[in-house]
Image (cartoon, rainbow, N blue to C red):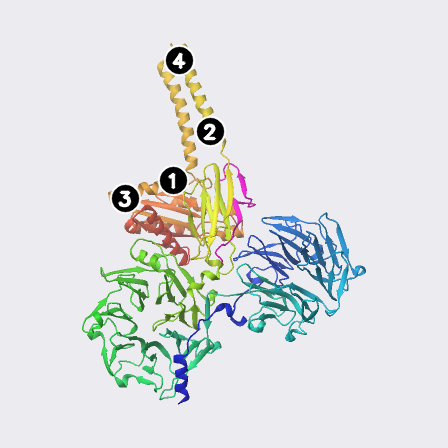
Amino acid sequence: MNLRYLLLLVFFYFPLLPLSAADSPLRDYYQDSWTTRNGLPHNSINSMAQTAEGYLWFATWEGVSRYNGRRFHTFVRGEQTGLADSGIRGLTTDGDGLLVVGARGSFSRYQHPHWQPQRSLPAMVNHVLSDQKGRLWFATEGDGIYMRDQQGTQHHFSSSQGLPGLAVYRLLQTEDGRIWAGTSLGLVEIGPDLEITVNRQIPAVPVQALLQTQQGQLLVGSGRGLYGSDKSGSFAPLHPQLAEEAISTLLEDSDGELWIGTIDRGLVRLGRHGLERLDTEQGLPNNQVVSLLQDSEGNIWVGTNGGLMRLRDAPFTSFTQEQGLSGNYVRTVLADENGKIWAGTSNGLSQIRPSGVQSVPVELPDGKVPSILSLAQQDNTLWLGTFIHGLIGLTPDRPPQIIDSRQGLSANEVRAILPARDGSLWIGTADGLNRLYQGRVTTYGRKNGLPGEFVMALHQAENGDIWVGTGVGVAILSRGDPAEIRTLDLHSQENAEYAFGFYQQAGSDAVWVATDRGLLRYRYRDDSLSIVGRPQGLPIEKMFQPVADQQGGLWLTTNRGILRLDLQQAHQVADGELDVIPFELFGEGDGMASSQANGGSGPAATLAPDGSLWIATAIGVARVQPKRLASLVRNNLPVVLEDIKVNGISVLPEPSLDLPAGSERIQIEFAGLGYVMPERIRYRTRLEGFDKEWVARDSQNLAEYTNLSPGHYQLNVAASYPYTPWSDREASLSFSIAPFFWQRPAFWILLGGGGLLLIWGLFQLRLRMLKRSAITLQRLVDEKTYALQQQTQAFERQAREDQLTGLANRRAFDEWLAEAYGYSEQSAHDLCLAVVDIDYFKQVNDRWSHSVGDEAIKAVAQVLKEQIRSQDKLARWGGEEFTLLFPDTSLKDAARICERIRRAVAELDCSPIAEGLSLTVSLGVADTSDALSPDRLLALADQALYDAKSGGRNRVEM
């Protein structure tokens, strides 16, 4: 048998086993790296730890950095930490706290959110150990070991007590209570009586790493190899390839794999894949590995002398030319009925197998390798649509079957293939639609009713209709009959034209169409067409291939990543029951070699029988297993409160706060401490005493409250990864706002009593002064009544007025909006609303100060008051945002006023506020034509503001 046909037989019939990322070799782990460019204070990561509340900590020579998944916060020497020097050498968790040691004998303890400075040591401390008796042991640089007992008495161990070397790097207490120390001249054991014994089986070289495994074995990393103990307590080299390796740090992960850091040869893993190495050639920041850590989510953190690296099991796995793919530019993928994955590339055909990726030879008469655009399987024939070679059929034990323009094909560029249920084969080309049946090719084009002849997608609906996606719309062949072609005009949906792909859920009469303007849904029962796209909250409008997973999700491939929607929610949006659709966007940060998914031919993505999705991209094939997404993250995410600002001033996040009267603006920043996909963590908050229900925050990790009434409140914050339950490890903050004297009940009681007393006095005066004229008496009563009314109005005004700008606040504006909207709805008069936002306002605060920011807000408020008309309403919405209400004003006129405001702010001289300061604003304006409620009108204006921001800022969008 010809070798080429034998290869085809192997490829067609070799069973595809599921790929398990848990068994991934070290080279396939997804890598993330951080250096000083990303916020680290120094690139040498001397030690790492994760504290009970979930923070990751990194010890460097320029301070200890706390990481929450998004940013680093660095603590240095000073009064807050009590550290004598910023050079930090060691981190050790101690219950729910963290022990921090370093240069100049620095020693401090952190227990969120407080630092507890401790008595320093005489020399630099490399490591600290808290033993089973509560004693603290300190390994120093050049001064031996110090032990501090529960009474605070300090004991010193040096050469006179038997230490072979005074530089001590690591301390370890084994389960039997013995203390081990790695020194500059070997390993020592400190017994229960505090006597030191030198272990002669370990060479007299630096010992920097000690570890007791889950099985109880003691591992010793020395300058001359890695040693392990046996049951008798004797030590021997652990692995021949590590015999002369200089070991710097050790870690055993939750799966029992051993991670080994070396002095100059990078990272080593010893486990199910044997001995594996990762060095600078494979992406390690530096070959000197100083520290190792596995966090609570299973990520492996590698601290080097050149930066920090994280190794993790990412949602996506990529297969590229480096793994054996024929070419990196993949246009189509197919999971056939046997579960095999085929990939059509610009440089031929490949198949992804459990043992790896292999090219499949396709011999053509001209000797060239075909550039493959489309794939399909019909019975035991694999059909390849190519760029210039037409249609190629691969059948085991038979030579390739070639169908091109010489056999009647309308064009050799084949972008879509559809095996129909009647046994025919439909072929979409760059110049028309073809049907191959019983060896005969029939061509259809515009003359037959197609809207266009550039065919990119084909689909057979459950009722037998053939759907044809072209560059100018969709054609539907009723029951597959070319004589009955009707077109589906897509222009009504955001002027869509290109139809790149189709999907129909089993048992549904709805067909989803991926277009250049979003995802469209056609429903047979009422011949309706609806859109789920950018107006409904999606960030990308050009979509190529819709594929549904087995968990109710709908995946959409795009040029800018892979979107995942909930299919039921997509139906709700299409039905008008939901205004905005939640989504996830996956890209290169999730393991894809390229976030650019290809389209225009297909299938560009496919669902395998095991539930995995395979996607054609500009750099290889990307694979994701949706059912694994939840397993990649832990459901019980801890939440911490990181910063609390009251009227712009930070306060320490204590569990309970007593705030003074006038605390009008409260900002609480929080963080869910997850590190697998920190940018996708979603939040919800509930302020008891204010919110009746939980408030969804999506990925926003800031809650802001303004003009809260005096009283007691409790804020609860929960977090979760998408599609996982909300964590029960909520963060909470209890706070009370004191009232002004005039807001206290006693004041009103006294005021009421005084008023009654006054009335009684006036009545008595009237009895005594019967001769006084009634006019004088009436005047006195009127004056007192007027004073009370003025005072009451002043109280009401304070509750409806912004203290900083003197403008109306959000409460007042909500009342205006409800009233104006009701009037507009009844009278059919125009009503417009604009949202104004100061551009780059955070930079004003960061560069100058919050007081300069306040002056900038007041300056913009003054410009707004000067530019609007007398009938317009102006309010400060919160922060740097303002809202404008334009009654009896068309959208065009409202936009003209907004443009006038924009110019006025841009021309504003800000030098009296701060030298070099300039301000611009972005404005979003909307009218009631598409708003069914006041809230919807506000949302439309807010969306327009978002478009103005996205469009470059300093502009007006409608």
Secondary structure type for disc 4: helix
In the picture, measured across the screen, residue 242 lies left or right of residue 697, that is: right
Tell me where residue 866 appears, x and y as whole percent. Answer: 39, 44
Please name which of the two marks, 2 or 4, marks the residue nearer to the observer.
2
Q: Residue furthest right?
A: 160
The circle drawn on residue 766 is 4
Q: Which residue is mark 2?
A: 745
Q: Looking at the picture, which amino acid does disc 1 mark?
A: Ala
Find the distance from the CA under tag 2 to the CA under tag 1.
25 Å
Q: Which residues are magenta?
A: 634-663
**Percent x, y of residue 203:** 73, 70
Q: Residues within 10 Å of mark 3 (few under 14, many from 20)?
A: some
| For marks 2 and 3 on the same chain, the one whose residue lies earlier in the sequence | 2
Under circle 3, the secondary element is helix
Mark positioned earlier in the residue sequence (3 or 1)? 1
Q: What's the residue type where badge 2 is placed?
A: Pro
Q: CA distance from mark 4 to mark 3?
A: 52 Å
Q: Are the two marked residues, 2 and 4, in contact with CB atoms closer than 8 angstroms?
A: no
Q: Which mark is residue 812?
A: 1
Residue located 45% across and 64% down the image? 628
